[in-house]
Amino acid sequence: MFTQRQLEHILVGSKTISTNDFNKFVTASEAKGQQLEDYLFAERVISEDNLYETAATLFQMPFVKMKNQPIRKDVLFLIPEPLAQHYQIAAIDTEGDKILKIITTDPENLQAFEFIKKKTGKDLAVSITTPSTFKEIMKQYHKSLQAEFQELTSIDKAKQEKNLQELAEDLPIIRIVDTMLEYAIFEGASDIHIEPEEEQIDIRYRLDGILKSVMTLPKNVQPGVTARVKVLSNLKLDEHRLPQDGRFKIQTKDYNIAFRVSIIPTFDGEKVVLRLLNEGAQIRTLEQISMQPKPFSILKKNISKPHGMILVTGPTGSGKTTTLYTILNVLNHPEVNISTIEDPIEYRMAHVNQSQVNPKIGYTFAIGLRALLRQDPNIIMVGEIRDTETAEIAVNAAMTGHLLLSTLHTNDAVTAIPRLFDMGIPPFLVASTTNLIMAQRLVRKICPYCITSYNLNKAAMDELTRQFDLKSILSMLIEQGSVTKNIKSFETLLFYRGKGCKQCNNDGYKSRCGIYEVLDITKEMTEAIVKKATREELLTITRKQGMLTMLADGFLKAKAGITTIEEVLRVTQE
């Protein structure tokens, strides 16, 4: 389906509709809550064939309508079905060894064309077709896959159990798993969930922190899919009652992805979760983590100190490790020895000695940290402080001339201090060794292709008023220079959201960024920590010192059009 911008380009550009009429149709479709293209078809302004034929002429591409025309299976499957469905692109024929003929409903999807070109190693001959024709082609995928699934269905369960190795090497199973992994890499998923249900298997990806269903598979392929993942990650094929963990890697010239595999038995079969770690990812610069000026200057000041602790807090998946790597990247000079103990190693860094824990053989964070201290390090990164022993060694390392970076699982920066107390660390040691505590969350960014502005309606205002002191938030926005001083009311502020488009899969969001709060351990804060102040007393000091909270940072980024208020509330509400 074409976007509004594309439709204007096609219909007004070809003089099929005047600009005035086009604007009237836009207004009418919005009033009806319909997509513009659907509205134009429903009102018979233009037919589907005429629209896509006009588009083909304008984009100087052939227009193709295929009716009951079979496509060779080997050609069709050059583009995996989920990719074809998502990007509305299908392979229909080849010309010799070098050219692949494809059809699409979106002639401007250059990113997808480039991906297919790299994947197939062929030059593309692109034609435009209608959505109706494309649906017919999708049926050919289903028929081909169903035929292959039928072969699997004919294998009785007892035989499957005996021949899991053979089943894992079956071509349809390999194709299913390869498609699933490849599509996840292309979509930028952080996790793949293979979830057995009573009558089917659900495949879900975590995209930008949110789980989304991407496909369902017949129940009969479950043993084969699970066996294939086990073979790839070198796990026991005949173990179905106990959890198993493994890993494997996929390397091509375009990407280098490590998969961390976890399998647990559930009522309907074994559930598989794969965590994707992009080992070829570029580590960001400090400027790229998008912090407000004051917290950024506090962070820069503290990472230049030769010893002490820098702690990053937040829940699982909030980007803590990525932030630590970003800091390490700044500190990574030939003059210093940097060593890490991690679980797992998520990024590879040149000139950094990275070690991975292995609880199976008793190699824990505490043991690894003790060993690192005998390696003459200047800077140490510990993946996570999980227990009292690790906390004690970390604090002692920070006290004896090392700069130590680590993470803690707390909801905000201030709570990290009582957490260290709970681990048995004396208050005077916490006060003397902690340089800085930083808390963070990841919010989805508004899609730049469909961003639109709006004012908060009464219902939204009532909800925000119920949860927050909007006057203090408005004062903060004025103080930070986000809005002008003459703004008196929250209702008049412009905020932003994504309308949803092809580029963001109609979500309105694309990619993620962090929101942060940075707790500087000032003289006043140090004195309060020594006295073992409560969380509430510490919060009072941070307010007096003007610390920007994650919520405040979120509102600043919502006002700047980076994210939405809904996203900020989603990740900050405890």
Image (cartoon, helix red, strand yellow):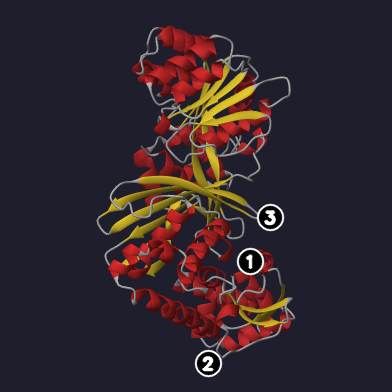
Label count reads 3
Q: Nearer the viewer, residue 538 or 464?
A: 538
Question: What residue lies at 62% left-to-right and 21% top-to-bottom?
Answer: 303
Question: What residue lies at 39% left-to-right and 37% top-to-bottom?
Answer: 468
Q: CA distance from mark 2 to mark 3?
A: 38 Å
Determine the residue located farthest toward the bottom in the rendered image. Answer: 68
Residue 488 visible (yes or no):
no
On-image quarter of the C terminus: top left
Q: Position of residue 458 (x, y in %)?
A: 39, 51
Q: First in sequence, mark 2 or 3: give its number.
A: 2
Q: Position of residue 471 (x, y in %)?
A: 45, 34
Determine the residue located farthest toward the front in the rendered image. Answer: 162
Question: What residue lies at 56% left-to-right and 91% top-to-bottom?
Answer: 69
Q: Which residue is mark 1?
A: 112
Q: Is residue 391 left or right of residue 181?
A: left
- Of helix, strand and loop, which one carries label 2? loop
Q: Is residue 225 left or right of residue 434?
A: left
On-image quarter of the N terminus: bottom right
Q: Residue 215: which quarter of the image?
A: bottom left
The disc labelled 2 sits on which kind of residue? Asn
Question: What residue lies at 67% left-to-right and 86% top-to-bottom?
Answer: 63
Q: CA distance from mark 1 to mark 2?
A: 26 Å
Q: First in sequence, mark 1 or 2: give its number.
A: 2
